[in-house]
Amino acid sequence: MFFVGQAWLKVAVLVFFLHFSIDFIRCQIEMKIFGSGGLNFHKTFAYLIGKRNDAGKPDNKILRTWFAINVTDQTAHLASLYAIVKLV
């Protein structure tokens, strides 16, 4: 019986708190780097797949920074889940 006791609820709250914290920090970093409007994902994706070729295209430094932020974000999520599994 998985629902016996409250251990599952404590783990769920911990996962929620860590996920929220990681995403909050990511948003703060992106706002500081890219401004309150952020990086326009739809225009950037359209440029990357070759559907846009306008003067507003993002430069490689911006794309590398955005990619690094995403890799760090996903790594933090996986590391937190791994740590929770090891603790439980």
Image (cartoon, rainbow, N blue to C red):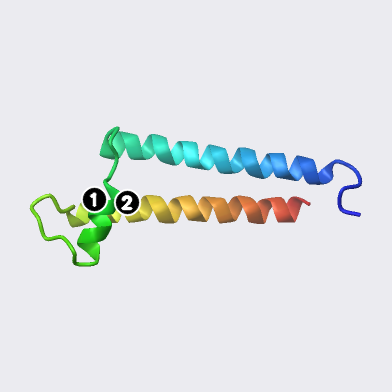
Using the rendered view, name the quadrant where residue 14 is placed.
top right
Taking the spot 78% from the left edge, 41% from the top edge, the residue there is 9
Circles 1 and 2 in contact, beta carbons < 8 Å: yes
- The answer to whether residue 4 is left or right of residue 43 is right
Image location of residue 61, percent across then percent down: 21, 53
Residue 88 place in picture, x, y as percent: 78, 52
Q: Is residue 61 left or right of residue 2?
A: left
Q: Residue at x 15, y 60 (%)?
A: 52
Secondary structure, mark 1, is helix
Q: In this view, does 22 lie above or below 61?
A: above
Badge 1: few (under 14), some or many (20 or more) residues near its Cα, within 10 Å? few
The amino acid type, in three-letter code, at marker 1 is: Ile
**Badge 2 amino acid:** Trp
Q: Label 2, on which residue?
A: 66
Residue 30 at x, y = what percent?
A: 35, 40
Characterize the local packing of mark 2: few (<14), some (14-19) or many (20 or more) Cα atoms within 10 angstroms: some
Up the image or down, 55 lies above or below 50; here it is above
Residue at mark 1: 62
Query: Quarter-wise, where is residue 82 in the image?
Result: bottom right
Q: What element carries label 2?
A: helix
Separation of marks 1 and 2 at Cα, in angstroms: 6 Å
* Residue placed most toward the observer, 54 or 70: 54
